[in-house]
Image (cartoon, rainbow, N blue to C red):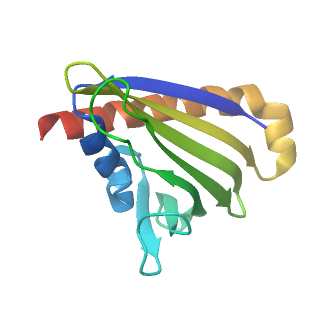
Amino acid sequence: MPRFTVSRDVRAPATATWETLVDWPRHGDWVPLTVLRVEGERAGGVGARFVARTGVGPLGFDDPMTVVTWEPPGGDDPGDPPGRCEITKHGRVVHGSAAFSVTPLPALRCRVEWIEDVTVSPRRLTRYAGPLVTLIGRAGFAATLRGLARDVERR
């Protein structure tokens, strides 16, 4: 399974960055060709479910996800506990997990680390094209974190 990690320092407090990251529908502002919708009444916490639709018109796929770990940051000061969210992906095209952490840094900054550990169907594609999937995923999520940083830093 391709596994990759991207990280980005953000010039904003950890708690504000966390709140922006867990506003699931806003992910569509940073992830190209993606719209995200929350399913059910719960948008946050363990058990929250949402679906990311990636594509153009009928050419696309759904990426349903469920939150399995939810630990908001303990504050904005260095040494405060980082926030951590882990998500399982259980779609027909993308399976596996994603996680992010938000770690407070000095001067009201934070570091966001995003980890993806996924398999793409058909599974043979992941097996043979794993390095390419990893390269594309890493580049895509680095761009996503740049967009997040721009968004939260403007506030």
Position of the C terminus by quadrant: top left
Residue at 73%, 34% (x, y): give it. Answer: 2
Residue at 62%, 25% (x, y): give it. Answer: 135
144 relative position to 107: left or right: right
* Residue 83 position by quadrant: top left
Residues 17 and 31: in front is 17
Considering every residue shown, the one lying at the far bottom of the view is 41
Considering every residue shown, the one lying at the far left of the view is 155
Residues 100 and 143: in front is 100
Position of the N terminus by quadrant: top right
89 relative position to 108: left or right: right
Q: For the image shown, how many numbered marks are present on the structure?
A: 0
129 relative position to 79: left or right: right
Q: Position of residue 66 (x, y in %)?
A: 59, 64
Q: Position of residue 61 (x, y in %)?
A: 59, 62
Q: Position of residue 63 (x, y in %)?
A: 59, 60
Q: Position of residue 77 (x, y in %)?
A: 28, 28
Name above or below for residue 128 compared with residue 73: above
* Residue 3 position by quadrant: top right
Residues 39 and 14: in front is 14
Considering every residue shown, the one lying at the far top of the view is 106
* Residue 90 position by quadrant: bottom right
Residue at 50%, 54% (x, y): give it. Answer: 70
149 relative position to 141: left or right: left
Residue at 43%, 55% (x, y): give it. Answer: 34
